[in-house]
Amino acid sequence: MAVGDDLKRAAGFAAVDRYVRAGTCIGLGTGTTAHWAIVRVGERVAAGEEIVAVPTSEATAALCRELRIPLAAFGARAIDVAIDGADEVAADWSLTKGGGGAMFREKAVALAARTFVVIVTPEKLVDRLGAFPTPVEVVPYALPYVEREIATHLGATIARRGGETPYVTDNGNALLDCAFGLIADPVGLDRALRDIHGVVATGLFASSLTAAVIVAAPDGVRELQKPELD
Ligand code: 5RP
């Protein structure tokens, strides 16, 4: 196991054991923390439980197939619970996601799920979002236009993911990593970005999406108390 994997494993296992019952349709996230939730679901399926998964990426779908976890297409079934990692969790539970490039499908699944559970290690907890650049998925044709609009009107420093070898999302799109500095209004920024023609999705997740945050630290696994929002 890589350094820190024991904590990611603890978070993933705890989320599945707390939120997944036999008969559940589960949305499964993408990344090194979500990996362990998938492994735990695989163990429970192998033990005979009926669990169906909606994957948020081709990588997650491949791991599910390897572990013989039955898959459902997005939209084919109601999703009881979705479990996923995050790059940043703010004090109000808004999130930055998309470090693994899967945020369009991750947001689709989180929006559709009755309960969206976020699993992280403590370094992901921040007061406000923004130290981690915001991933923005863009239709390749519109890339130079979108880049200019974001830089000119929203004041970000922008890097094309992959550089010389452009990163391609599961949806066939490009990714821009946009540094805005600390973000005062993630919902407003998400909307402003999506108003630019060619932007498909952003990695900013509204705080209202998150139902639970599970944090695995060296001294144990805990569930954060829901913040009081104005
Ligand atoms: C993928 C994501 C991941 O959930 C996020 O990047 C966290 O990944 P990890 O658990 O590997 O740190 O949003 O698009």
Image (spheres, grey):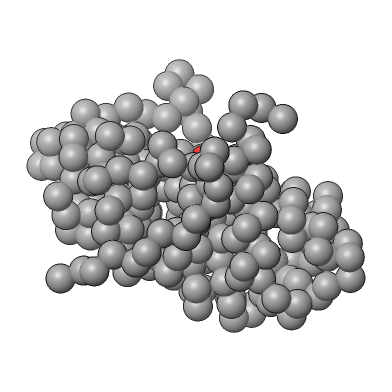
Which sits in the foreground, 154 or 211? 211
Residue 160 in the image: state x and y as whole percent: 37, 29
Left or right of 106 on screen, residue 34: right
Residue furthest to the front in view is 219
Q: Is residue 146 visible?
A: no
> Which residue occupies 21% across, 29% down?
157
> Which residue occupies 45% across, 18% down?
164
**Is 5 rendered above or below residue 13?**
above
Left or right of 132 on screen, residue 1: right
**Is 119 rendered above or below residue 117?**
above
Residue furthest to the top in view is 164
Q: Which quarter of the rendering shows the C terminus?
A: bottom left
Total numbered labels? 0
Residue 229 in the image: state x and y as whole percent: 21, 69
Q: Is residue 162 visible?
A: yes
Left or right of 1 on screen, residue 141: left
> Which residue occupies 63% across, 48% down?
10
Residue 196 in the image: state x and y as whole percent: 22, 52
> Which residue occupies 50% across, 22% down?
165
Question: On the image, which quarter does residue 228 sit in?
Answer: bottom left
Which sits in the foreground, 3 or 149? 3
